[in-house]
Amino acid sequence: MLRKKAILLGDERPVEHRMARTLSWPHLVALGVGAIVGTGILTLTGVGADRAGPAVLISFAVAGLICACAALAYAELSTMMPAAGSAYTYSYAVLGEIFAWVIGWSLILEYSLVVSAVAVGWSGYAAPLLDAWLGIPMALMQGPQLGGIVNLPAIFIIAVVTGLLMIGTRESATVNAVLVVVKIATLALFVAVALPHFDGANLDPFMPFGFGKTMDADGVERGVMAAAAIIFFAFYGFDAISTAAEETKNPERNLPIGIIGSMLICTLIYMIVAAAAVGAISFTIFADSPEPLALILRELGQPGIATIIAAAAVIALPTVLLAFLYGQSRIFLVMARDGFLPQSLARISSRGAPVRITIVTAVLVSIIAGVFPIDEIAALANAGTLIAFAAVGLCMLILRKRAPDMLRPFRTPGALLVGLIGILGCAYLFWSLPSKTQLYFLTWNAVGLAVYFVYGMRKSLAK
């Protein structure tokens, strides 16, 4: 259970398992921004304001700080071990097999739920347009949770993004970069319209529900940290960059630029957008709204701009799908190489893309998105991510002690402080999650450990 795996870098692998190095740092920054800026800022501003009031600004800052510490740890480890697999790979090399399995199992949960939730969210925007423009009845496009049979638009968009990934990594990254520009321009438009309406009176009282997690009379957990634990969903995505290590040119230089650059850009964007939102109108108006930015614009007498924001969401949300579907397929790829999945799935196509595992990943998330309700369960994605981020911080600190002279093309400044903030911050955010989410997560990992002892431990190829 504690055996560790020697990390083979991409160029050391057999030709049939070797992926083409086609990505430079602009592709990686665009991949990170595409994953991070999406459903979170478009929807979770309202959810966060409902739990923290105007102090949601502090919630964004706290979540951003913890993610920044995790990003620095990812940057150091990804340059030391530029191999696919992200936190799963690092844990296998540093902590041991059973820890890697738990992290991999948690990442499966994170990526599957994020892809499925975003696909369902995209469907929510697209279905009314398809009904109005093409006359397709809404009942035929809804999942069982809404009285239909299967969520067809959600499955459709997953299929489109999967096809793009199968064509090739560079081609899909180029399309992603274009859509990211559309997304940033849309948020800039929102800020340009909302910021002139900023009124300091809308920030009073600034922290109506306190700082720590507290339960109100309706059974809703509120407070700055309770909000941070939920809107944490809006920040992660940079970890998908580390899964691209084997497809990156000059990974020692480009991976840190991609990881840290995307985090800095997105944190700045989130703070500006959140400030414009809570300053423009009272948070009580858009609290818990599924479309807070569009609602704010309508309240400001700008229905046309609100429609543009909604349309841009339909165009740009697939960038989140692309980044996370990409990341999950690479994690599955590495687990197949290690024997935890059939090794035949790890074969690479002539274009340097893992076509088989991408198809398997797409089928899995299509089933979830097309049939299962996502709403409450989506918070589980946060739980899986928090565990993975804490593990990466721990791996960085252990290697600093165990192998101080090991080559580190990127060294995290103040590694001890950064690592401790990342680990303890993730632990506190996990505690701040709803109790039901914590129970679901523990149940998921209990099932995962059973699978490991029955199947994974026997099939492992690690020596």
Image (spheres, rainbow, N blue to C red):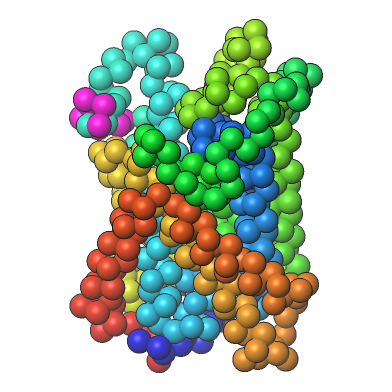
Q: Nearer the viewer, residue 397 or 107?
A: 397
Q: Nearer the viewer, residue 446 or 360?
A: 446
Above or below: residue 146 compared with residue 454: above
Q: Quadrant of residue 306?
A: top right
Q: Is residue 122 magenta?
A: no
Q: Is residue 189 left or right of residue 8?
A: right
Q: Is residue 150 magenta?
A: yes
Main SS class of the magenta portion in the image: loop
Q: Residue 93: horizontal and vertical position, in percent?
A: 51, 83
Rendered-image quadrant of the N terminus: bottom left
Q: Quadrant of residue 156?
A: top left
The total of numbered circles placed on residues is 0
Q: Which residues are magenta?
A: 145-152
Q: Residue at x 55, y 57 (%)?
A: 240
Q: Quadrant of residue 157?
A: top left
Rendered-image quadrant of the C terminus: bottom left
Q: Residue at x 58, y 62 (%)?
A: 425
Name the residue at the front extreme.
217
Residue 18 visible in rendering: no
Residue 420 visible in rendering: yes
Q: Nearer the viewer, residue 257 or 353?
A: 257
Q: Residue 234: horizontal and vertical position, in percent?
A: 56, 44
Above or below: residue 285 compared with residue 334: above
Q: Residue 65: horizontal and vertical position, in percent?
A: 67, 56
Above or below: residue 437 compared with residue 152: below
Q: Residue at x 47, y 58 (%)?
A: 430
Q: Residue 127: horizontal and vertical position, in percent?
A: 38, 21
Q: Residue at x 36, y 57 (%)?
A: 438
Above or below: residue 105 compared with residue 432: below
